[in-house]
Image (spheres, helix red, strand yellow):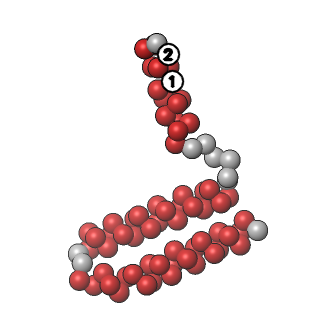
Amino acid sequence: MKWGTSVGVTFAVLFMIGYEWPKFRQYSKREKRAFAMLAAFGWVLTLLLVLFPDLPGPTQLVDFLFGPLGKLVE
């Protein structure tokens, strides 16, 4: 079932890019590149969360990095 969801997400991202790309004719290459990179980044994050739902979140990273500093301040 995870692979079905992954394929569905991939088709959704491809549809989004295919729908929006013709509207980008008037924009510069830099804006097209930014759109493609943001879409790719979102696609990768979505696939990671679908395939590995137990991944730690960003708050756990912040706790790991700044936890010792918080104990020193107290």
Q: Residue at x 39, y 70 (%)?
A: 36
Amino acid bearing label 1: Gly
Q: Residue at x 49, y 34 (%)?
A: 62
Spot occupied by residue 44 in the image (x, y as percentages of width and height): 53, 61
Q: Give the Cα separation between the discs numbered 1 and 2.
A: 6 Å
17 sits to left or right of 54: left
Work out which residue is located at the far bottom of the displayed protein and give it: 22
Spot occupied by residue 13 in the image (x, y as percentages of width and height): 51, 74
Quarter of the rendering occupied by the N terminus: bottom right
43 sits to left or right of 37: right
Spot occupied by residue 17 in the image (x, y as percentages of width and height): 44, 78
In the depicted structure, whether residue 58 falls above or below residue 43: above
SS for tag 2?
Answer: helix
SS for tag 1?
Answer: helix
Please give the label number shown on residue 67.
Answer: 1
Amino acid bearing label 2: Lys
Q: Residues within 10 Å of mark 2 (few under 14, many from 20)?
A: few
Q: Residue at x 50, y 19 (%)?
A: 68
The residue that mark 2 highlights is 71
Q: Residues within 10 Å of mark 1 (few under 14, many from 20)?
A: few
Please give the label number shown on residue 50.
Answer: none
Q: Residue at x 51, y 78 (%)?
A: 14
Residues tagged 1 and 2 counted as in contact (Cβ below 8 A): yes
Q: Quadrant of residue 37?
A: bottom left
Work out which residue is located at the far right of the displayed protein and give it: 1
In the depicted structure, whether residue 56 falls above or below residue 45: above
